[in-house]
Image: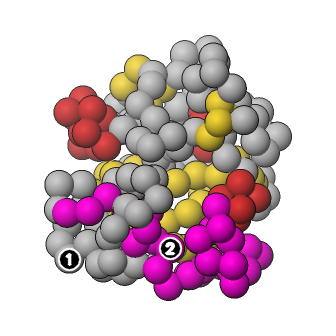
């Protein structure tokens, strides 16, 4: 998917998503305009549709064979971009991979948007995130964080992260209560 997922009903910044059969999303600064531009921000359990199996459909489109990409799916893409990537490492995975995934220019990224070429058509945006610890939105234009459907444990999930001042692609872990961007992948 060459854009951030934007499905569901917008909920307030001070509300956790719930397993109520309704897809819920955060819009940066509680603004629907930001969801239209950057996509929704989702907590991990909501993205997974309250299923813990990596690669599940989650909240991805029900028709057309879409699923939430697991850590291994991201790894396969990263190794395609740079065969030396160690998919078990945390931190920066490859020096130029992030730039190959980021949209060019400064519409979706704050300057300097280092290394952005979007050469593989991934079209990553810097949609920021919803921080569950401070219950506040941060980093719009600076970072793009994407959940994988792979848990680290009951509290943390593995994510991928891009930033405006680096061409690196980062593999990190983060609390599953944070609200991050989601991409879906064709089966």
Is 170 placed left or right of 121 in the picture?
right
Provide the residue span drawn in magenta. 77-105
Q: For residue 101: magenta?
A: yes
**Label disc, if present, on residue 97 of the rendered structure:** 2
Q: Is residue 76 above or below residue 125?
A: below
- Please state which of the two labelled residues, at mark 2 or mark 1, is closer to the viewer: 2
| Residue 116 in view (yes/no) | yes
- Tell me what residue is drawn at x 27 percent, y 32 percent: 36
Q: Earlier in the sequence, mark 2 or mark 1?
A: 2
Q: Percent position (x, y) of residue 113?
A: 26, 72
| Color scheme of the displayed model | secondary structure
Residue at image coords 41%, 63%: 119
Local secondary structure at mark 1: loop
Q: Position of residue 167 (x, y in %)?
A: 40, 78
Q: Position of residue 110 (x, y in %)?
A: 20, 66
The answer to whether residue 71 is seen in the rendering is no
Residue under the image location 46 percent in, 80 percent down: 96
Above or below for 142 versus 134: below
104 and 70: which is toward the camera: 104
The residue beneath circle 1 is: 112
Q: Secondary structure at mark 2?
A: helix
Q: Residues within 10 Å of mark 2 (few under 14, many from 20)?
A: many
């Amino acid at each position: 998917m060459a854009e951030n997922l934007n499905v569901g009903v917008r909920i307030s910044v001070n509300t956790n998503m719930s397993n109520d059969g309704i897809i819920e999303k955060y819009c940066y600064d509680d603004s629907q305009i930001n969801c239209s531009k950057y996509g929704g921000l989702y907590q991990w359990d909501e993205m997974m549709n309250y299923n813990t199996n990596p690669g599940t459909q989650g909240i991805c489109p029900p028709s057309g064979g879409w699923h939430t990409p697991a850590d291994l799916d991201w790894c396969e893409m990263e190794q395609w971009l740079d065969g030396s990537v160690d998919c078990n490492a945390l931190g920066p995975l490859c020096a130029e991979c992030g730039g190959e995934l980021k949209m060019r220019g400064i519409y979706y990224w704050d300057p300097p948007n280092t290394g952005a070429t979007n050469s593989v058509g991934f079209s990553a945006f810097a949609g920021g995130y919803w921080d569950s610890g401070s219950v506040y939105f941060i980093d719009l234009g600076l970072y793009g964080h994407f959940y994988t459907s792979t848990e680290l444990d009951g509290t943390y999930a593995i994510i991928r992260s891009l930033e405006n001042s680096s061409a690196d692609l980062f593999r990190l872990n983060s609390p599953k209560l944070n609200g991050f961007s989601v991409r879906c992948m064709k089966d």
